[in-house]
Amino acid sequence: MKLSLNSQLEKLYRDYTKREYIDPDPLMFLYEYEEPADREIAALIASSLAYGRVQQILKSIRSALAVMGSSPFSFALKGSEKQFRSAFADFRHRFTTGEDMALLMCGVRKALRTHGSLQQTFLFHYSDTDETLLPALTGFSHELCCFFPEHASYLLPSPEKGSACKRANLMLRWLVRTDAVDPGCWDRVPKRKLLVPLDTHMFRIAKELGLCSRSSANLNAVLEITRAFAAFAPEDPVKYDFALTRFGIHPVVNKKKLPVKLEKKGA
């Protein structure tokens, strides 16, 4: 019997949403921190640097977290701008410099001293009346990037100019959801308002499944794809993201053919 797209997605979720399929996903770094205060900062760093070649991404994240010691929270809260600049003096990840990392940490320190945590910082900009987390993400980005020119940085882009904000939405998925792979810790942000972290792999898959009519992987595509997945999982529209993207990330799974029929949505 031919399974519906919904049933196929659920099977894919059961089969591939497992810890064994995380590596080499930057998500793996979050498991090194039990305390939410440390984990949320690790998530920010790991997601911000998640661009470029996979092995270089992992090397850069490991390097950045290493200089922060056993507690990224303590490092950020107690550090000075001079200490941040010194700690990241030799850091470089593609076009992200040690100066960029120091400025981001200055923004994190200010947010922690103002709100107490990154979750509280995010919630400060959040409203229950917002349809998605985009308004909160915009405010969150501006606040953490307040030491950059124009309060903007590629490390944590704002969605207000139409960016898909893949890395920021990835961070939110990691922190808001809790299942076999996403460790969670932000318990006051509703997962039903999460948006799909849209990269080239997910964009291609969504197009193949008839879930997106857009020609570019921009914010409009993010909203369209998220609405399509919400039709299957309204309380958790990014539920299938990890499983689907294994076919573009994981070295073993990537060799397999995506076991979902290329059907139109609603099939």
Image (spheres, rainbow, N blue to C red):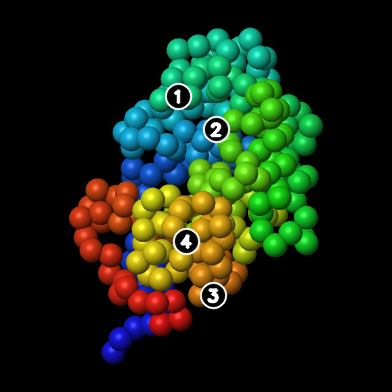
* Figure quadrant of the N terminus: bottom left
Q: Is residue 43 above or below residue 74?
A: below
Q: Are marks 4 and 2 in contact (CB under 8 Å)?
A: no
Please give the label number shown on residue 165: none
Q: Quadrant of residue 148?
A: top right
Q: Nearer the viewer, mark 1 or mark 3?
A: 1
SS at circle 2: loop
SS at circle 4: loop
Q: Which residue is mark 2?
A: 154
- Residue located 44% across and 37% down the image: 50
Q: Which residue is mark 3?
A: 231
Q: Considering only order in the chain, which callout, 2 or 4, is on the residue closer to the N terminus?
A: 2
Q: Are marks 1 and 2 in contact (CB under 8 Å)?
A: yes
From this viewpoint, is residue 263 visible? yes
Crowd band around label 1 with a 10 angstrom C-alpha radius: few (<14), some (14–19), many (20+) = few
Q: Considering only order in the chain, which callout, 3 or 1, is on the residue closer to the N terminus?
A: 1
Q: For the view shown, which residue lies furthest in the front direction?
A: 215
Q: Nearer the viewer, residue 259 or 76?
A: 259
Q: CA distance from mark 2 to mark 3?
A: 32 Å
Q: Amino acid at mark 3?
A: Ala
